[in-house]
Amino acid sequence: MAELPGSVLFACSMNAIRSPMAEAILKSLHVKRMFVDSVGVRKGEVDPLAVEVLDEIGIDLSRHRPKTFEQLEDGFFDLIVTLSPEAHHRALELTREMACEVEFWRVPDPSLVEGSREQRLEAYRALRDLLVERIRARFPPPAGPSL
């Protein structure tokens, strides 16, 4: 298995959809192999559609409580993955004085999609599937059952 970071932070605008989904997916692939957390630039509320689409693949997001960069209990991470331009700028400010890699993953914000409930769910599923693909590629899971 490739060298994995010991700690990863996912960041987006409100810690309501993209970053908590990424956190939960990575945790499901690498249970207890690394420390994983997520934050937002601003504090939002967990999006129920994000909870629903992760539940479809057996991941529970219902207990996630959004937080901001300022609310982090541990300020050191090996890698910060940003999922919105706003979060990327904030992460770069945060890491000016620490040795930490920052990666920007351009991913869509499904909350911007309008339409029927099913059309909106499809946007959330597309994000979920994209995150699973990116996370599996960046953090290869150990052999055995997985997503």
Image (cartoon, rainbow, N blue to C red):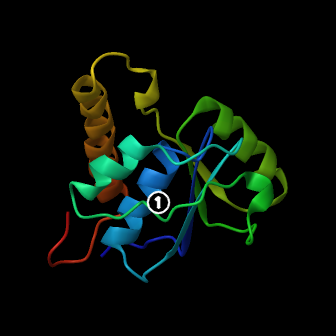
Residue density around tag 1, few if under 14, some if 14–19, many if 20 or more, within 10 Å: many
Q: Where is residue 99 in the image (x, y as percent from the top left)?
A: 73, 62
Q: Position of residue 75 (x, y in %)?
A: 76, 66
| Residue closest to the far top | 115
**In the rendered view, would you say 129 is above or below 66?**
above
69 sits to left or right of 124: right
Can residue 64 be seen here? The reply is yes
Which of the pair 25/17 is nearer the observer? 17
Q: Which residue is drawn at 61% across and 54% down?
A: 66
Residue sitting nearer the eye, 31 or 114: 114
Residue 145, by quadrant, is: bottom left
* Label total for image: 1
Frontmost residue, 106 versus 3: 106
Return the residue found at the far left: 145
Expressed as whole percent of the image width and height from the top left, the position of residue 117 reads 28, 27
Q: Work out whether 83 lies above or below 46.
A: above
Identity of the residue drawn at 26% across and 39% down? 125
Quadrant of the snapshot with the C terminus? bottom left
- Give the quarter of the figure containing the N terminus: bottom left
Which percent across, then down, holds residue 67? 68, 55
Q: What element carries label 1?
A: helix
Does residue 41 sit above or below 108 in this rendering? below
The residue tagged 1 is 23
Q: Which amino acid does label 1 sit on?
A: Glu
85 or 25: which is nearer to us?
25
Give the residue displayed 31% in from the left and 70% down from the top.
29
